[in-house]
C-alpha cells in the first residue's frame, strides 16, 4: 500500500469510527423522548419472514417531549411490537390501547443521568482506542514504503505527520460529540 492509499484508508476508517459513535449516541436516552431511541428495536413477525426493524412495521411519532406513539401499519402485529418493546433495553413499559402503543418516558433521576454520562464516556474511550489502532495501522503502512523507489525520508515524515494530525482531528470530533451529548443528558 503506497503512502496516499495508507492515508486515505486511515482517514476513511476514522470517519467510520466517528459515524459509529454518532449512531450510538442517537440511541442514548436523554431527558426527552427521541424517535432514534427505537432504531435498535426489532420485531419478530413470522408472517413478515422473521425479525424486522420496528420502523418497517410501524409509524413512530413524538407527542410532546416525554411520549412516543407507535402505530402499526398492520393492526395484527400490535402484540408482537409490544413484546419487542418490552424486551428492549429501553426500560419503558409500553401502554397498548388496542390500536396504538404509547411509550411514556419519565424524567431521568440525577443518578441515572450520571450513569448515562459514565456509559457514553466509556464508549468514547473505546472509540478513541479504535482511532489509535487505525493510526498504528496507517503508520505501519507508511513505514512499509521506507526504501521504496521515489519515496524520500521527507515524504515518509510528512505522511506520519499527516496521520498524526488526522488522529488529533478525529479525536477532537469525538470529544465534541461527547460534550454535546453529556450536556443533553445532564440538562433537566
Image (tube, helix red, strand yellow):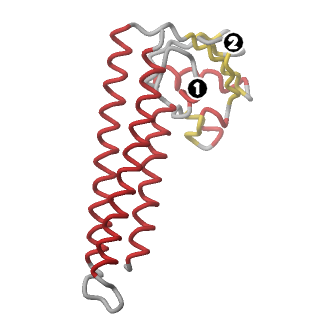
* Relative image position of residue 172 (x, y in whole percent): 39, 43
* Relative image position of residue 61 (x, y in whole percent): 69, 22
Query: Which residue is at a point 66% across and 37% down the rendered structure image?
Result: 56
Q: Which quadrant does the N terminus fall into?
A: bottom left
**134, 69: nearer the viewer:** 134
**102, 185: nearer the viewer:** 185
* Relative image position of residue 23 (x, y in whole percent): 50, 39
The residue where tag 1 is placed is: 80
* Residue at the bottom extreme of this rendering: 149
Does 64 sit left or right of 16 as displayed? right
Relative height, residue 9 to residue 104 (above, below): below
Does 86 sit left or right of 63 as displayed? left
Point out which mark residue 98 bears. 2
Relative height, residue 97 to residue 12 (above, below): above
Q: CA distance from mark 2 to mark 1?
A: 12 Å
Query: Which residue is at a point 32% across and 31% down the rendered structure image?
Result: 121
Amino acid at each position: 500500500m503506497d503512502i496516499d492509499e495508507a492515508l486515505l484508508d486511515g482517514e476513511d476508517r476514522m470517519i467510520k469510527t466517528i459515524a459509529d459513535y454518532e449512531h450510538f449516541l442517537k440511541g442514548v436516552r436523554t431527558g426527552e423522548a427521541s424517535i432514534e431511541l427505537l432504531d435498535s428495536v426489532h420485531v419478530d413477525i413470522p408472517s413478515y419472514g422473521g425479525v424486522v426493524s420496528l420502523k418497517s412495521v410501524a409509524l413512530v411519532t413524538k407527542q410532546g417531549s416525554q411520549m412516543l406513539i407507535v402505530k402499526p401499519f398492520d393492526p395484527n402485529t400490535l402484540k408482537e411490537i409490544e413484546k419487542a418493546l418490552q424486551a428492549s433495553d429501553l426500560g419503558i413499559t409500553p401502554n397498548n390501547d388496542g390500536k396504538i402503543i404509547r411509550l411514556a418516558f419519565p424524567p431521568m433521576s440525577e443518578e441515572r443521568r450520571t450513569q448515562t454520562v459514565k456509559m457514553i464516556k466509556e464508549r468514547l474511550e473505546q472509540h478513541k482506542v479504535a482511532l489509535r489502532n487505525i493510526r498504528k495501522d496507517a503508520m505501519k503502512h507508511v513505514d512499509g514504503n521506507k526504501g521504496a523507489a521515489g519515496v524520500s525520508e521527507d515524504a515518509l515524515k510528512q505522511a506520519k505527520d499527516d496521520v498524526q494530525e488526522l488522529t488529533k482531528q478525529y479525536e477532537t470530533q469525538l470529544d465534541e460529540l461527547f460534550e454535546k451529548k453529556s450536556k443533553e443528558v445532564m440538562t433537566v
